[in-house]
Amino acid sequence: MHKATTVKVIAALLAALVLMFSILPTTHESQTATPTMASNSFVIDNVRIFDGKQVLAATQIEVRDGTIVAIGDAVSADGIETIDASGQTLLPGLIDAHTHSFASARADALRFGVTTVLDMFTDPTLLDDAIAQRESDIATGEATLFSAGMLATTAGGHGTQYGIDVDTLANADEASKWVKRRKAEGSDYIKLVYIPESRNTPSIDLEVATAVIRAAHANDMLAVAHISTIAAADELLRAGIDGLVHIYFDAAADADFLARARDANLFVIPTLTVTSVIDGNLPGQAILDDDALSPLLSQGQLAMLSQSFGISTSRGFAEQSRSNVSDLHKAGITILAGSDAPNPSTAHGITLHQELDLLVQAGHTPIEALRAATSIPADTFGLTGRGTIAVGQRADLLLVNGDPTTDITVTRNIERVFHNGFDVERELPEPATSLPATAAPSELSDFEDGITAADGFIWSVTSDDMMGGKSSAVIAAVQPGAGGSAGAMAVTADTASGFAFPWSGAFLAAQSTSTVENYGNVAFDIRGTPARMRLMLFSTGVMGAPPTIEFDITNDWQRVTLPIDDVTGFDRTQFAGFAIVTPAAVGTYEFMVDNVALLP
């Protein structure tokens, strides 16, 4: 019996700022919180109100059918619930101005009071549903999404390394049609990547960047940019960029840049939390260690908060970034709060609260930091009905214990979250169970009757093709199996280059989220092309590359038992399945699998 000795999480850290993504679709309903109030009409009484700009003298607010209808003396509680909020503060729902939102991201964000997210690169096919949702006033367990959709980059440039089919730009003449395609897809604004200083990653040049900016403006769209250096920021400022979605962290800006930025109404989303991680810090650990917050974190959030860029030595980026934000703020340049989740040591929703704290450390007052996550992004991006508490606005609201206008850390002390006026359930949902709740061995597949599996499970091929890669696989029933059994599953897997970490093989999918917390091992018989194979473990909603256990196979049948009870990034209560796949090395591999089981 061979036991794996190596358990590792594969991380695609191929650029300074990494976009982590979900390899497989998640079970939507298991990750989406449900509103707890049957009605979205209510009154909140005895509450401190920060309206997105200032603290109001009024202490009452009335919501009818998800819309704020009265504040102060005009409030009437006739026929609706009254909530006593003594000692609490009511804020507009927070707006995260820099995310990459997929899988359970928007549900995770909403649990922490982030009612709107501005996505800076996602699959454009997701936009239709997002647009329909934000235009409705129904009960939903997900934050509202606005998005850049596809980003502007060049062949092989930043954004192309994640397996998504990216519509790249080769020259300036393509910019106009490229922007029109984004607008037709539903993009709300245009994001471009401009990192000409990079030695390892190609970038669009200044001519192309300028053409994209002009095309965005011609289509009445904002143009924002991913940059890293003050030189790149200065070049794009001269080219007419509207906003920077990261702070430059190599040097300080001079007085001339600051004056021109102010005059041009430039805005900046610093993403200080991610810069801190790049500088070797692990801000996510403080959240993991917080006993009040950690029970509210999904497995995806826990996994991301525990990761790092693998950097342990500070290069001064975090300090320089805070200093740069301070200079911008003093010069009157608009600052928006954004988390850039889900990068290592960040997570959707909760990291925005850390970002607010970092803005305060960089010179903002608590009220100024709150504006950076409410009224300012709403005004900057034209988010009608959001970002402020006023009559006629949507009732996207965050109720916290204490006073965040004097202590910014109070924002994470959440009492209730309202989205479209509905009270959002913040407790994580219990997983569905499709396996025996006993500790007895559970056989999943013996292949006696072909490629079948236990109730609630199904076998299929899996490869990086689903993420735009070029690998492929074929599965088939064969006879005999291990020890002369009546059958086995044969897999022919062709692992090809073209993806960050290529894979191909067979996937056993749970048809609904399951719990395998009573099981500590996966076992199966296997033989095939001698190689170091991988078992990829999937949990519903977990973002990033799946945790992987490596094991060796030979030409002879052997029983492999792999421990899954203590694998970082795998949640046995949110089990979505596992895959038996080839090494990442390019090549064609053939193997056979039989007698797959879960063991205590």
Image: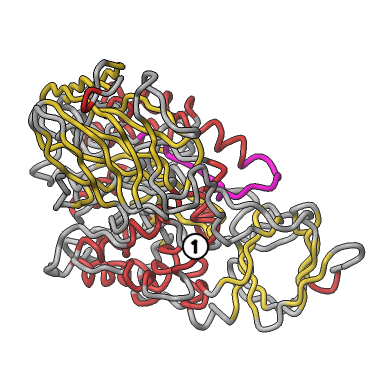
Instruction: Please tell me which residue is depicted at 59% across the width and 66% down the height of the picture.
Output: 52
Residue 481 sits in which quadrant? Answer: top left
Examine the rendered structure and indicate whether residue 478 appears above or below residue 167. above
> For this view, does 173 lie left or right of residue 298?
left
Please indicate, yes or no, whether residue 166 appears anywhere in the rendered image: no
Magenta-colored span: 134-150
Instruction: Write down the residue under mark 1.
Output: 373
> For this view, does 396 lie left or right of residue 452?
right
Marks counted in the figure total 1
Instruction: Please tell me which residue is depicted at 17% across the width and 64% down the height of the picture.
Output: 251
Q: Nearer the viewer, residue 411 or 486?
A: 486
> For this view, does 60 lie left or right of residue 563?
right
**Circle 1 SS class:** loop
Q: Position of residue 426 (x, y in %)?
A: 58, 61
Whether the magenta-drawn stretch holds residue 58 is answered as no
Identity of the amino acid at label 1?
Ala
